[in-house]
Image: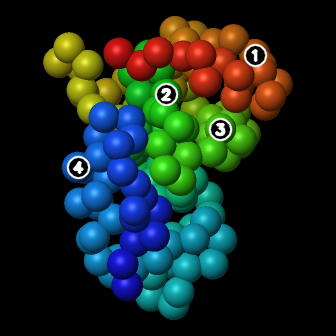
Amino acid sequence: MQREIGSGIKDLYGIEKIIEENAGKRIDIYLEERNASPGQHLSQNNLYPGHTKDSMCLLSNDRVFTGDTLLIGQCGRTDLPGGDSMDMYETLFKKLAGISNDLIIYPAHDYKGNINSSMGYERVNNICLKTKRTPEEFASFLKGFSHP
């Protein structure tokens, strides 16, 4: 089965080629937060939606792989195909909120040679996490936030 998210996108965000290539990639396994197919199960306690509908965060023991959802010092974009600021809010402030400050996060990108951070450090220093906002305020913040 082909991906639907991003298919048919033209002249958008300056990353059209990547979106077009990704739209043509085959999906081998669908994972859902609550009910994955038999043999493809990840506990709902270990899988969180990401910054777009086809991304996710994976929690494993003492670390969480956050992809482009939670980055070092910031968070991912929700203005891309499949992005949703309310889903991002739920993941950042409700699902990831309960994890330990000592948990090591591994985002999809490194930053000036930093390949990981800690949840406690991000709670205090991350521009997207350190200020308490309502879901609506967070959505507004993301619209005005310029990603480097």
| Percent coordinates x, y for residue 81 in the rendering | 49, 50
Identify the amino acid type marked 2. Answer: Cys
| Percent coordinates x, y for residue 70 in the rendering | 47, 32
Element at badge 4?
A: helix
Left or right, 117 with reference to 140:
left
Element at badge 2?
A: strand
Q: Residue furthest front?
A: 11
Query: What is the CA distance from the residue labelled 3 to the residue labelled 1?
Result: 15 Å
Identify the amino acid type marked 4. Answer: Lys
- The residue that mark 4 highlights is 17
Judged by depth in the image, the label closer to the viewer, 2 or 3, is: 3
Identify the amino acid type marked 3. Answer: Ser
Q: Residues within 10 Å of mark 4 (few under 14, many from 20)?
A: few
Judged by depth in the image, the label closer to the viewer, 4 or 2, is: 4
Query: What is the CA distance from the residue labelled 1 to the residue labelled 4?
Result: 36 Å
Sequence-wise first label, 2 or 1: 2
